[in-house]
Amino acid sequence: MVLKLLVAGAVAMAARRASSDNSPAQERVTTVCKRAHDLEMRDAPIEPDWILEGNPVARAAEHVRSADDSSFSALWDCTAGTFRWHFNWDETVIILEGEVHITDEDGNAYTLRAGDMGYFAARSWATWRIDNYVKKAAFIRRPFPSPIAALYRLRNALRQQQPTF
């Protein structure tokens, strides 16, 4: 049964890729470079039920999105406040300005300052406390469905067992 699901998933992905690869309207973009301060920051309100303290005001600007919509990069900033945040997708951040105090769902506490990086797994929660202001660059990736992720892990395990010459 699992094999049938994997094969069906692979066929569906191949069909999707073939239909998108043949579209003359889609131009392949290989490099996107922009000045961060040229990106237009727009309001990105935090879910009101997630706010624990203060009145944090968040803004965001998308830098680029992949053609298959599986990943994107963005800038995000926020004023003082404390809130819970749910990460729908895997997210890696680099703090550009300010700092943020983060407590993950296991109770581990971190402080990220300008130049620091953090990773947040998809479907996880964290509490963010911003005393003044924080600005981050975010790299966000949709996780693969479980059967596809299992195939990647299997492939990687098989590659590690191959002799190198």
Image (cartoon, grey):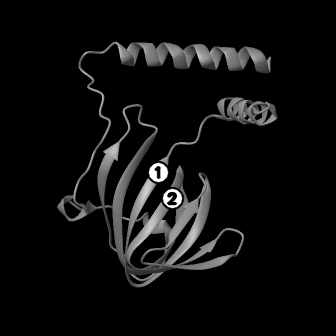
Left or right of 156? Residue 124 is left
Amino acid carrying mark 1 in the image: Ile
Q: Decide: is 10 above or below 134.
A: above
Check the image and report above or below for 78 versus 148. below
Visible in this render: residue 22?
yes
Q: Residue at coordinates 54% horizontally, 20% vertically from top-left?
A: 13
- What secondary structure is found at the residue carrying circle 1? strand
Residue located 72% across and 70% down the image: 106
Q: Is residue 113 left or right of residue 57?
A: right
Which residue corresponds to mark 1? 140
**Residue at x-position 44% and y-position 66%:** 94
The crowding category of the residue bearing disc 1, from other C-alpha atoms within 10 Å (few below 14, some 14 to 19, many at least 20), is: many
| Figure quadrant of the C terminus | top right
Can residue 88 be seen here? The reply is no
Q: Is residue 82 above or below residue 49?
A: below
Residue 88, image x, y percentages = 53, 51
User: Which of the 4 image quarters holds residue 160?
Assistant: top right
Image x and y of residue 131, in percent? 43, 87
Q: Residue at x 52, y 65 (%)?
A: 85
Q: Quadrant of residue 136?
A: bottom left
Compare marks 2 and 1 and give the one earlier in the sequence: 2
Label 2: few (<14), some or many (≥20) within 10 Å? some
The image position of residue 63, as x and y in percent, is 30, 51
Which residue ends up furthest to the bottom in the rendered image? 131
Q: Which residue is mark 2?
A: 92
In percent of width and height, residue 40 lies at: 20, 59
Q: What quarter of the picture does the N terminus occupy?
A: top right
Q: Residue furthest front?
A: 165
Left or right: 64, with 1 as reference point: left
In whole angstroms, how far apart are the C-alphas of marks 2 and 1?
Answer: 6 Å
Question: Is the residue under label 1 in contact with that under label 2 (CB below 8 Å)?
Answer: yes
